[in-house]
Amino acid sequence: MASSDFTHYEPAARAKKKDSDALAAVEALDEKRFYAVLEAEHVTACGYAPIAALITYAKALGARRAELLGYGTSGDVTGDKSSVVGYAAVAFKKPA
C-alpha cells in the first residue's frame, strides 16, 4: 500500500488534467513515465516515491494491470474549485 495526495492548490480543472496524466502512467504500470509526467507537468504529488515503489513492487509480485477505483478533489467536498488537492485510489491486479 502507498498513500499520497496528488496535485496541490491549483484550480480543479488544471489539477484533474495533471493528475489524470500521472494516473494514466500508474494504470500503465510505468514508473518511468510516471516520473516523466511529474516532472514535465509539475505534479505536486507529495508521495510520488512510494507510488513509484508500489508500481515496481506490484509488477514484481505479478501485477499486470492497475485500475483507477476513484478520483476526486477537495473541491468536490468543499465546493471551492479555485484551489484543490487531488486524491485517487488505485488497485493493482494480477491475472485471474
Image: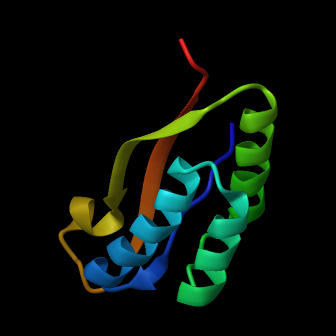
Q: Residue furthest top?
A: 96
Q: Residue at x 40, y 66 (%)?
A: 20
Numbered disc total: 0
Vertical relation: 3 (above or below) 21: above
Quadrant location of the N terminus in the rendered image: top right
Q: Say which quarter of the image contains residue 84.
A: bottom left
User: In the image, 12: left or right of 53?
Assistant: left
Rendered location of residue 91, percent (x, y): 52, 34
Q: Say which quarter of the image contains residue 79.
A: bottom left
Residue 42 vs residue 9, the one in the foreground: 42
User: In the image, 35: left or right of 24?
Assistant: right
User: In the image, 53: left or right of 93?
Assistant: right
Residue 74 vs residue 22, the one in the foreground: 22
Colour scheme in the image?
rainbow
Vertical relation: 34 (above or below) 82: above
Q: Residue at x 53, y 11 (%)?
A: 96
Q: Say which quarter of the image contains residue 61.
A: top right
Vertical relation: 40 (above or below) 34: below
Rendered location of residue 73, percent (x, y): 34, 64
User: In the image, 26: left or right of 48?
Assistant: left
Q: Residue at x 31, y 85 (%)?
A: 11
Rendered location of residue 23, percent (x, y): 49, 59
Q: Residue at x 53, y 86 (%)?
A: 41
Rendered location of residue 2, percent (x, y): 68, 44
Vertical relation: 18 (above or below) 48: below
